[in-house]
Image (tube, rainbow, N blue to C red):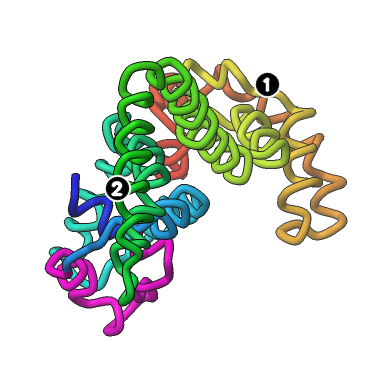
Amino acid sequence: MAQAIEVATKIANGELETGRGLNQIGTLKQARDTHWSSHLDSISSLLKMFNATWVVLSNIAVDGGSYSQRGDANFVLNQLLSFKFVFTLHLMKDIVEITHLFCIALQRKSQDILNAKYLVSSTTKLLKNFRDSGWDDFLISVEHYYRMDIFLATIDYQLQELHSRFNDHTVELFVLSTALDPRNGFMLFKIDDICKLAEKFYLNDFMEQELVRLRIELQHFELDIPNHHELQELSGIMSYVKTW
């Protein structure tokens, strides 16, 4: 979990090279070995850039320069998309927000002892209040984030991929192509669909006169199918091509 937070945060902050090729080799392993300080800015950055970080890791998991790098990216990606990771990330953000002023005060070269003492007291009280009464609001925020930024975003991404690969144009091509399916004695054979397929999707493959003759040739073929018993046992269009 700590490694996943470290790597994902460095990607969100732009501290890791994520391009393809040699610049990418070993990057994830180097990040793993670096001590990570859980500053509020780093956590906030990861929350803000969560979707972008997910996309980057997904790309590395597929296109990484080595098997080891792809494996590291897959590991971090699986952690990143888990409820435990998101829960922990939000919990850390809320806790670090409470302790942030106190941590900043401790890092100053000239410390105000009285102010530090006050911050210890107030930080302790705020943490106790969060422990005793912050659970419900915290869980609601995590559930909302998990639903919006992971659950819905993942499904929307898949829907977008499906739409880009199988848009109306592609689906129509598939539907019209079924008219060429030779199985069951060309049961799905439809002359109108084949003519439309040729005119809309394969226009460059036909001369004008060939398109004019196509319909009548298909009509002859449709009547001739029962006379060829070998056509009754075809399993696909490739098996039909091999018979001619």
Q: Is residue 81 above or below residue 199?
A: above
From the viewer's perspective, tell me whether residue 37 is left or right of residue 219: left
Task: Please tell me how crowded label 2 is: few (under 14), some (14-19), or many (20+) other residues with Cα within 10 Å.
Answer: many
Q: Is residue 96 visible?
A: yes
Measured from the top left, where is residue 51 in percent x and y?
49, 48
Work out whether residue 47 or residue 63 is closer to the camera in this orientation and state it: 47
Q: Secondary structure at mark 1?
A: helix
- Quadrant for residue 238, please give it: top left
Q: Earlier in the sequence, mark 1 or mark 2?
A: 2
Q: Give the Cα separation between the discs numbered 1 and 2.
A: 58 Å
Q: Residue at x 29, y 56 (%)?
A: 38
Q: Is residue 58 visible?
A: no
Q: Nearer the viewer, mark 1 or mark 2?
A: 2
Q: Is residue 145 above or below residue 58?
A: above
Residue at the extreme front: 114
Residue range corresponding to the magenta coloring: 9-34
Task: Please tell me how crowded label 1 is: few (under 14), some (14-19), or many (20+) other residues with Cα within 10 Å.
Answer: few
Q: Is residue 143 above or below residue 60?
A: above
- Quadrant for residue 68, please give it: bottom left
Q: Tell me the kind of residue under disc 1.
A: Leu
From the viewer's perspective, tell me whether residue 219 is left or right of residue 65: right
Q: Tell me the kind of residue under disc 2.
A: Leu
- In the picture, the disc for residue 68 is none
Measured from the top left, where is residue 146 in percent x and y?
45, 29
Q: Residue at x 17, y 66 (%)?
A: 35
Q: Residue at x 25, y 61 (%)?
A: 37
User: Does 23 appear in magenta?
Assistant: yes
Work out whether residue 195 or residue 66 is closer to the camera in this orientation and state it: 66
Residue beneath disc 2: 77
User: Does 106 appear in magenta?
Assistant: no
Residue beneath disc 1: 223
